[in-house]
Image (cartoon, rainbow, N blue to C red):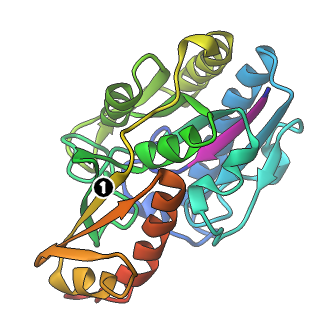
């Protein structure tokens, strides 16, 4: 069984502020979190191999360079670098099972630590067939197009609740309890690692009881942006319907096409953003 690990940083143990994730490898705060993140991923890798995984790929997905290669479990392969064409889901279709390690809740989630949906200053809401969706749902939906099951999610309490709501009977590990957006009660990282290792093993052991995420097709994708300019820029994309000042809509046959549209909007709406306004 081939396991794909998509890892992000906001849902890693002890991460509560953007300062800890500044994309500058020399900062002590980031170095500390890189080590915690690598060890947290290792826990998932270890659990996967304990339950029969034959191959594990780790796709790092924050600013790039989060995983410390020398500390990564030697049995895993690292998918390094950024940008990747499909970012968090690049090469996912070649695997059987997906783990989401260090994920965060979607934008607007109460007590979601560093909650956002892809671009914190751009996307206020993203919906598929009217259902609010964050990055957890994005990867799960794309994987489901290839029959891939999302079996494990780790992150803050809000992120894990979001995963359960979307995906049902999956394994989750709550690594911190958010108090607002920038504070959390955090168990010791070693405690979280033990729980992640056990949950990863259980996820593969019980994989026949976990189903891929499915939604009615064709699919309706809706983006609510923070500014009207961001919505305006998205009208450059073929098939875009602007339904209000800050909302655009797309109709897609499936989420293979849906993720392509999502990536295009990420490129285009950034062009409509300003660092101050």
Q: Residue at x 76, y 45 (%)?
A: 94
Q: Is residue 189 above or below residue 179?
A: above
Horizontal relation, residue 187 to residue 128: left or right: right
Q: Is residue 212 magenta?
A: no
Is the magenta region chiefly helix, strand or loop?
Answer: strand
Which quadrant of the view contains residue 56?
top right
Q: Locate residue 238, reporting x and y percent.
A: 40, 81
Which quadrant of the view contains residue 53?
top right
Camera-side residue of 217 and 188: 217
Q: Locate residue 7, reporting x and y percent.
A: 59, 46
Q: Locate residue 74, reporting x and y percent.
A: 89, 39
Point out the image quarter for the N terminus: top right
Point out the image quarter for the C terminus: bottom left
Q: Can you identify the residue that label 1 sits on?
A: 220
Helix, strand or loop at mark 1:
strand
Q: Is residue 3 magenta?
A: yes
Q: Residue at x 66, y 46 (%)?
A: 35
Horizontal relation, residue 140 to residue 198: left or right: left
Q: Residue at x 22, y 40 (%)?
A: 111
Q: How many marks do you count on the picture?
A: 1
Q: Locate residue 155, reporting x and y percent.
A: 44, 36
Find the magenta span and give its range: 2-7
Camera-side residue of 98 and 22: 98
């Amino acid at each position: 069984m081939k396991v794909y690990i998509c890892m992000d940083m906001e849902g890693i143990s002890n991460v509560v502020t953007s300062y800890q994730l500044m994309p500058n490898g020399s900062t002590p705060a980031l170095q500390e979190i890189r080590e915690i993140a690598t060890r947290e991923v290792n826990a998932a890798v270890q659990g996967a191999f304990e339950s029969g995984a034959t191959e594990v790929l780790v796709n790092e997905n924050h600013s790039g360079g989060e995983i410390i290669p020398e500390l990564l479990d030697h049995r895993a392969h690292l998918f390094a670098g950024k940008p990747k064409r499909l970012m968090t889901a690049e090469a996912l279709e070649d695997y059987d099972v997906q783990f989401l390690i260090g994920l965060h809740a979607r934008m607007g989630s109460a007590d979601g630590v560093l909650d956002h949906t892809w671009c914190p200053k751009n996307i206020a809401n993203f919906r598929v067939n009217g259902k609010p969706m964050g990055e957890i749902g994005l990867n799960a939906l794309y994987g489901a197009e290839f029959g891939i099951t999302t079996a494990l999610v780790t992150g803050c309490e809000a992120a894990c609740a979001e995963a359960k709501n979307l995906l049902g009977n999956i394994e989750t590990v709550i690594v911190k309890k958010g108090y607002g957006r920038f504070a959390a009660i955090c168990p010791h990282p070693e405690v979280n690692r033990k729980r992640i290792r056990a949950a990863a093993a259980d996820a593969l052991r019980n994989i026949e009881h976990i189903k891929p995420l499915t939604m009615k097709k064709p699919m309706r994708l809706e983006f609510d942006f923070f500014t009207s300019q961001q919505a305006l820029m998205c009208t450059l994309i073929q098939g875009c319907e602007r339904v209000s000042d800050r909302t655009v809509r797309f109709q897609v046959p499936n989420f293979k096409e849906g993720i392509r549209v999502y990536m295009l909007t990420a490129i285009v709406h950034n062009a409509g953003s300003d660092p101050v306004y």
